[in-house]
Amino acid sequence: MEFLPVLAGEVTGNPERPGVPTLGEYTAGQLRRLCEVASLDADDARTYTDVLVEALGPEAGRRLDLPPSGRTFLSDDHTPVEYSLSFRPDGPPDLRVLLEPGCGTDGLEENGRAGLDAVHGMSRRWGFSTTWLDKLEDLFLPQAPQGPLALWCALELRPGGVPRVKVYLNPAARGAGRAAETVREALDRLGHQWAYAALPPGDGHPFFALDLGDWERPRVKVYVRHPGLPATAAGDLSRMPAGPTAAALREFAATAAGSPDARLSGLPVLSCHAFTDPAEDRPSGFTLHIPVRDYARHDGEALDRAVALLGRHGMDPAPLLRALPSLTGRRPQDGVGLIAYLALAHQRGWPPRLTVYLSAEAYAVRPPSG
């Protein structure tokens, strides 16, 4: 995959701050401006930017004229940070930041230990339990782990300076051939003995995720990979009772991919299946993730599709239009990947949400295609 380097004068998107920043300065600036977009106040913005820089550890002090010290799977250009805006019809979007606390460590085992230490530090700071994660440590953070990641942490940033926390784990940590076994065992330990049978067929499990902290209904989430999926087949993936209709999912996939006849043969579509009640054998939530960056010539096209989908679901696109220049000084037409994923989420008891995943592009920009 070809990339163009980010130039020092472009990297902050802020001409009043010349020179080459560190990774921490760059991402903190982006997050501070995104907090404004999401209607979080200045105190919350300061709190959350401090949390971000602290979680990145020594890597936060690394200058951006140096290459990334590790090849994180979290983003295409190996920036260990990604943002997302989750839209709903009745208010400002929720801002989330996904990060890899162990970025820059020497190997996956050390990466996982650093990530686990970071999450335990957050649990002490904000007073939440890590019981679910502790029950699964040997499955997902073994000695000599395999696969593309160890532990990622997502923070859903709320007013008041206390985020909701999610962790993302690697089902292939004990080997790709044991990923399904690992997911089954993890679900069983958490009381969801029947959950695995409810998943749709696919080509493996890229992530296993847990809600930690102050969630009204904490979720266990299993992701399924669907390479080569036709947009018309997206309607067959949900197993959620009274969830999204097949027609709604097909329409979402077709719009995100750019054509109702699209076959998504680049980066695979991901489905996510959320479980909240161990007594139930079906998911309480479903999300369809389309990697729009692989199916658009440039971010201008991806943005048009996102705006169309937001309008179709009665959601205000204005925060997204403000978000892009808060991340970069480049035009959307000059690269592809700033908008990484579009996702349609359904959770029982809540209205549908549309989430736009945004890349930090700290190190490089993928040039437009075609």
Image (cartoon, rainbow, N blue to C red):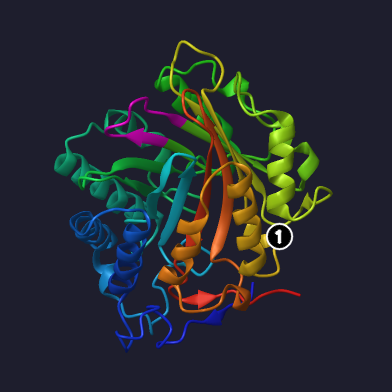
Q: Please, which residue is most extreme toward the top here?
A: 279
Viewer-nearest residue: 81 or 330? 330
Q: Residue at x 56, y 18 (%)?
A: 282
Q: Residue 178, relative to residue 262: is it above or below?
A: above
Q: Residue 30, relative to residue 93: is it above or below?
A: below
Quarter of the picture containing the C terminus is bottom right
Q: Please, which residue is most extreme toward the right here?
A: 261
Which residue corresponds to mark 1?
Answer: 295
Residue 330: percent from left, percent from top: 51, 79
Q: Is residue 94 left or right of residue 24?
A: right
Residue 116: percent from left, percent from top: 29, 46
Q: Residue 243, relative to residue 118: is it above or below?
A: above
Quarter of the picture containing the N terminus is bottom right
Q: Residue at x 63, y 48 (%)?
A: 309
Q: Is residue 248 left or right of residue 341?
A: right
Label 1's element? loop
Under mark 1, the amino acid is Tyr
Q: Magenta stretch?
A: 210-220
The image quadrant that residue 303 belongs to is bottom right
Asked if the magenta segment contains residue 217, the reply would be: yes
Residue 297: percent from left, percent from top: 70, 69
Viewer-nearest residue: 139 or 8? 8
Viewer-nearest residue: 260 or 3? 260
